[in-house]
Amino acid sequence: MSEEGAASFFNEVMASDRLRKGLGRAGERFLANKQSFDHNVESILDFVNIPSKRDFRELKSRLDTLSTQLVNLSMKVDRMLAQKGPSESKPRASKGKPAAK
């Protein structure tokens, strides 16, 4: 369908009260059915213990928050170490193998 044909069709639909109301009701029913379908799919995924898109979005949000907090904590530790100076800071224990006895 060409652009002119589509424009003509929509002008006709919008000019007719009956068609406009019918199209509005169809859109409302479509949205209600989609919401119902989405809810049912989410219930099924929850029942079989598969994460939904909402679960992933919430998890991503929590990870973003934790990541921000970790960066802030790291910056504070760096500032504290810089204020202490190199002579006052204790050497860190190595994470390698424990010393042999």
Image (spheres, rainbow, N blue to C red):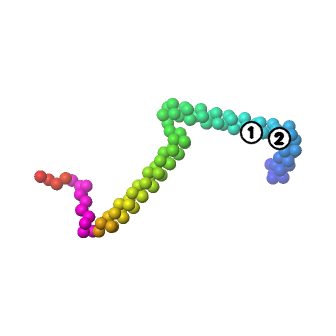
List x then y, in percent, for residue 65: 47, 51
The residue under label 2 is which amino acid type? Arg
Asked if residue 28 is positioned above or below residue 66 in the image, the reply reads above
Residue 39 falls in image quadrant: top right
Question: Of the numbered discs in the image, which one, if any, rests on residue 53?
Answer: none
Three-letter residue code for mark 1: Gly
Q: Quadrant of residue 34?
A: top right
Crowd tier of the residue under label 2, counting other residues whose Cα lies within 10 Å: few below 14, some 14–19, many 20 or above = some
Residue 88 visible (yes or no): yes
In the rendered image, the vertical position of residue 43 relative to residue 98, given as above or below: above
| Residue to which mark 2 is pinned | 20
Q: Is residue 83 magenta?
A: no
The disc, 2 or 1, on the residue closer to the chain's N-terminal end is 2
**Crowd tier of the residue under label 1, counting other residues whose Cα lies within 10 Å: few below 14, some 14–19, many 20 or above:** few
Which residue, given by chain and number where applicable, does mark 1 sit on?
Answer: 27
Q: Nearer the viewer, residue 46 or 82?
A: 82
Side of 86 where 14 appears, left or right: right
The percent position of residue 63, horizontal first and vertical second, equals: 46, 49
Does residue 87 appear left or right of residue 65 in this picture? Answer: left
Residue at x-position 84% and y-position 44%: 14
53 left or right of 17 in image: left
Q: Residue at x 42, y 58 (%)?
A: 72
Tell me what residue is drawn at x 61 percent, y 36 percent: 38
Q: Secondary structure at mark 1?
A: helix
Residue stretch rendered in magenta on the structure: 86-97
**Is residue 9 shown to the viewer in this render?**
no
